[in-house]
Amino acid sequence: MTVEGSGSARRTPRHVACVMDGNGRWAARRSLPRTSGHLAAETTVIDVIEAARTAGVQWLSLYAFSTENWQRPSTEVDFLMRLVRRVVRKHAALLHARGIRCRFLGVADPRIPPALARDFADLMTLTGENRGMTLTVAFDHGGRRDIVAAARSLIRSGMPAEAVDERSFAAHLPFPDTPDVDLVIRTSGEQRISNFMLWQVAYAEWMFPPVLWPDFRAPHFVECLRAYQQRDRRFGGVAPDANGERRP
Ligand code: IPE
Ligand code: IPE
Ligand code: MG
C-alpha cells in the first residue's frame, strides 16, 4: 500500500535534501585554510546532482548557506559569495542541458552581492520551464524565517483565523509547490537540523553519514537511497503485516 502519507519507503525518495557539512574539517585535516574545503565541495555538488538525477529523484535540495552563517568571519563569507557565483555561472549551461529546474531558496539579506542575486535570478529564468529534476539551493536560508514570512503573508491576505489550516499555511511558504522532504542526508556526522526547511522536514527520514562533504560521492548518495528503502515509514500509523496490510 503506497497511498500518500503512509507506506513503506521501498522506492526512490521523491525529495532528498542534503546539509552539506564538513568542509572546514576536511580542510583542517589537511592543514589547509577552511576556504579550501569549500573549493573542494564543488566536485561533490556536481556528483550528487548527477547521482540524484540518475536515480530518479525528482526534487533535490542543497543547503549551501544559512541565515546563521553570516556570523562567520567576513573573509570566509566573501569567499563563499564569490565561489557560489563562479560555480553557478560555470555550471548553468550543463544544468539547463540536463533539464534541471533550478531555484534559490532564501536570498533575502541585503549583504548578498547584487551580481550574485542577478545570477541566481538568471538561472531560475533560464531553467524555469525544465521538468527533469528540481534543484533547490538553500542560500541565505532559515527555516524559521520562512515560517515567519508565511505567517506575515497569511495575515496580510486577511484570511480569518478559523480558516487557517496546515494546507493554507503551507501555501504561503516560499515555493509552495515543494513537496515534503522524504530523506535528509547530513554529512560529517553532525546530528542537527540547523534551521533547515523546518516545515518541509516534519516527517523526513534522516541519515548522518560520517564522511565529510568534500569526500562524499555518488556511491555514498546511492547507499543512502538504499538505506532509505529499508526504512518503514509509518507516519504515526502501524507497521504493515507480511501481506503489506496495516491492520490494528
Ligand atoms: C559546510 O561546511 C559549508 C557551509 C556551512 C557553508 P562547514 O564550513 O560548516 O564545515 P565544518 O562544519 O566547519 O567542518
Ligand atoms: C549548516 O551547517 C548550514 C549549511 C550546511 C549551509 P553549519 O555548519 O553552519 O551548522 P552548525 O553550525 O553545525 O549548526
Ligand atoms: Mg559545519
Image (cartoon, rainbow, N blue to C red):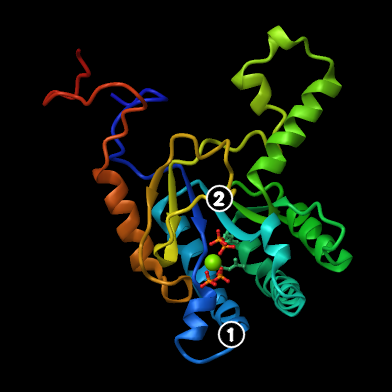
Residue at left 80%, top 56%?
121
Would you say 23 lies left or right of 231 here? right
CB atoms of marks 2 and 1 within 8 Å: no
Mark nearer the viewer, 2 or 1: 1
Q: Is residue 183 above or below residue 166?
A: below
Label placed on residue 36: 1
Residue at left 20%, top 14%?
247
Front-most of 186 and 121? Answer: 186
Residue 76's x, y, as percent? 70, 77
Q: Is residue 45 above or below residue 200?
A: below
Q: Dot 1, crowdedness within 10 Å: few (<14), some or many (≥20)? A: some
Front-most of 114 and 219? Answer: 114
Q: Which residue is mark 2?
A: 132
Residue 145's x, y, as percent? 71, 42
Residue at left 76%, top 36%?
149
Q: Is the residue at mark 1 in contact range of ligand 1, meaning its CB lies under 8 Å from it? A: no
Location of residue 238 by image quarter:
top left
- Secondary structure at badge 1 equals helix
Q: Is the residue at mark 2 in contact range of ligand 2, meaning its CB lies under 8 Å from it? A: no
Query: Which amino acid does the dot numbered 1 rest on?
Result: Ser
Residue at left 74%, top 28%?
151
Label placed on residue 207: none
Query: Which amino acid does the dot numbered 2 rest on?
Result: Gly
Q: Quadrant of the C terminus?
A: top left
Quadrant for ligand 2 reads: bottom right
Q: What is the spatial separation of the Cα atoms under label 2 and label 1, in whole angstroms?
A: 32 Å
Would you say 64 lies left or right of 48 here? right
Would you say 212 lies left or right of 152 here? left
Residue 104's x, y, as percent? 70, 53
